[in-house]
Amino acid sequence: MPAGEGGSAVPWWGVASALLANVLYSTGFVLEKRALAGLPALSTRQPGRVVGHLLSSPLWLAGSLALAAGFAAQLAVYRTLPLAAAQGLFVSGLVLLLLLSSVVLGERTSGRERQSIVAILVALALVIASLQGEDARAVARTAPPGTLLLIAVPSLAAGLLLYGSAERRARRRHRLPTAGVPYGVAVGLLYGVSSLAIKGVAGMLTTHDIPAAAGRLLRSPYPYLLLVTGAAGLVLSQTALQRCRASVIVPVCTTVTCVFTVVCGTVAFGEPLPADPLRRALRLGGTAVAVAVLLALPRHEPPTPNPRPHHRS
């Protein structure tokens, strides 16, 4: 077979790994949400108690193991696919998440949220179609540390400030319950930074000269960014997930993570977009659809209608 023919095939191993990660992440989030319903109210002001409550729940631990397996699959994806393509595939997991939230958690999705499922499937098709051709699958391994930190530090600060602002607004009386969008955006920024760190770790993994590779990894900012985002994301995401519907929190978080990783990751890692105009349009179109999904989601839960009083005749 000529090299050109073999080189133009879609890397199905990376696509399959991304879809497997979607299944594991969706399952993990749903299990955690189910576990959180039986735990005392969590507060970000008491992170130690949050962790203690979480570790006491076998169901939550099962969910976290599913997420850990999804993390391993994500490492394989980042070694096979460029960031923009990988994130487009990860967004497709929202379809499964919404279905599981409805079936397992009994969360009722709105018509607008159901429409987002169709949009996500369109984004998935666009991204997969953009993977034809060697130039469309260029994968970078590392990013300059200075550039990475210049992106990561302000993004982490913005995520924490936004989460704190959402917390203050939620404590006000006479306010509609939040649907979780502000929380999802804040956690999405943290996980966006985490996604860049995962990408960097994946690029440094090797079976050759493991001690030298481990030394290079420890001298890079990647493991420390993972530590910070993992600890903060654990407390913030679980507190938000307990308060709000998983079918809102997770899609918003995933979409923000996707867009952040595509935009900032392309800058930090220098991965080029496909040179072919059609494939470039497909890649960018899939990202645009993901943004549209985020903007279409409602910001607040609809008010519960009060039952009409019975009047005596």
Image (spheres, rainbow, N blue to C red):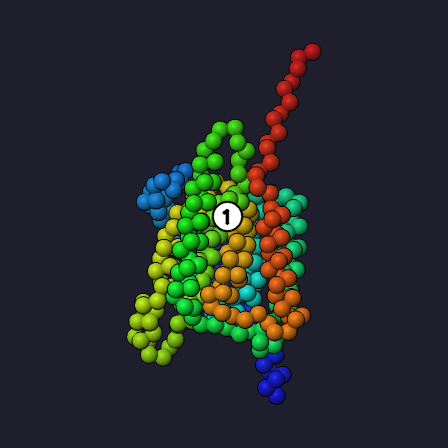
Q: Is residue 187 left or right of residue 303?
A: left
Q: Which corner quadrant holds the C terminus?
A: top right
Q: Position of residue 119 (x, y in %)?
A: 65, 55
Q: Position of residue 259 (x, y in %)?
A: 54, 57
Residue 194: tell me if it is visible: no
Q: Which corner quadrant holds the N terminus?
A: bottom right
Q: Identify the residue at horizontal 34%, vertical 44% (top origin).
A: 47
Residue 40: tell me if it is visible: yes
Q: Which amino acid does label 1 sit on?
A: Gly
Question: In the image shown, does 59 or 124 lie closer to the viewer?
Answer: 124
Q: Is residue 67 left or right of residue 95?
A: left
Q: Is residue 85 left or right of residue 171?
A: right
Please, is residue 311 above or below residue 229 in the view? above
Residue 49 figure quarter? top left
Please, is residue 309 above or below residue 104 in the view? above
Q: Where is residue 28 in the image (x, y as percent from the top left)?
A: 47, 54
Q: Mark 1 points at which residue?
A: 184
Q: Identify the residue at horizontal 34%, vertical 74% (top origin).
A: 213
Which residue of the protein is positioned furthest toward the bottom in this rendering? 2
SS at mark 1?
Answer: helix
Q: Where is residue 229 in the image (x, y as percent from the top left)?
A: 39, 55
Q: Identify the residue at horizontal 58%, vertical 78% (top origin).
A: 134
The crowd level at tag 1 (other Cα within 10 Å; few <14, some 14-19, many 20+) is many
Please, is residue 312 above or below residue 204 in the view? above
Q: How many marks?
A: 1
Q: Identify the residue at horizontal 62%, vertical 29% (top origin).
A: 305
Which residue of the protein is positioned furthest toward the top in this rendering? 313
